[in-house]
Image (tube, rainbow, N blue to C red):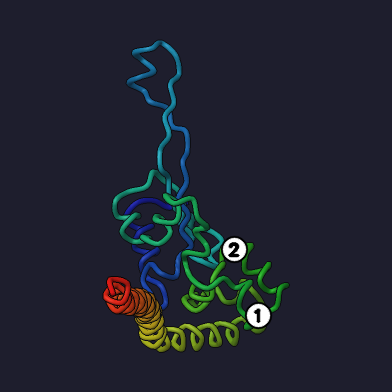
Amino acid sequence: MQFADEEDMKLAHQTGTGYEANHAEFRNQPTKDDEASDKEGRAIFKPCEFCRVRIPGDKTLIVDRPATEEDKLNYPRQYRAFKESRSQDEASGTLLSAWSGVTAERCEEYRALRVMTVEQLAGMQDGHLANFGHGTRQERERAIDFVKTMKGYAPTAQIRKELETANAQLEVMQRQMNEQKAAIDELRRGQAVGAAFAAVTAVEQPQKRK
């Protein structure tokens, strides 16, 4: 295993995707607290956030260390999912298992070297393609096309979401207006009945006095 700056340099240089193509996983790991241990005269452990990062398809480079602020900034979706106890793989992108571009058997082969998402497959370096055998280059091209397509759909999806929210708000407003109109109509009917009753009473009273 290699360390520090050289590790980060390799992790950052993916196929035009920066850190996004890496497989990152945060976890809590008990770590010895030397100061507390010396004070108590026994081993004291405390939880410490660790980050393990691998380049998908790379059999050798594994970064596993206490999580740095840079790790949290480089992998914000995974870190947020970790803090919220959600799947970090699902937060990383589109799972290969949910994509029709590869078979279930190929998903397992990719999983063995931490290629979990379509985005990670799309960002795989040429030098790692041979680790997965024949057809990997074509699968990577399909993954690249898929990612480009999804990025193109993103604004449309956002607009659709905003329209759905606006329509829902309009439905609520229309329902409230209908309820108010019904209440006003009911009040008016009550007032009309009261007015008619008062008119009848006014006519009857003089007749009784006669």
Tell me residue 184's x, y (percent): 32, 77
Few, some or many C-alpha atoms within 10 Å of disc 1 (few <14, some 14-19, many ≥20)?
some
Image depth: mark 1 or mark 2 in front: 1
Which amino acid lies under the numbered mark 1 shown in the image of this protein?
Answer: Val
Q: Quadrant location of residue 81?
A: bottom left
Asked which secondary structure carries label 2, the reply is loop
Q: Depth check: give the residue in front, 120 or 79.
A: 79
The residue shown at (62%, 65%) is 111
Q: In the image, which disc is placed on residue 113?
A: 2
| First along the sequence among labels 1 and 2 | 1
Q: Which residue is mark 1?
A: 102
Q: In the image, which disc is placed on residue 81?
A: none
Tell me residue 69's x, y (percent): 29, 51
Few, some or many C-alpha atoms within 10 Å of disc 2 (few <14, some 14-19, many ≥20)?
some
Q: Is residue 3 above or below residue 76?
A: above
Asked which secondary structure carries label 1, the reply is loop
Q: Can residue 139 be seen in this snapshot?
A: yes
Relative side of 24 to 103, left or right: left
Q: Is residue 14 above or below residue 34?
A: below
The residue shown at (33%, 78%) is 200
Tell me residue 185's x, y (percent): 35, 80
Relative side of 112 to 19, left or right: right
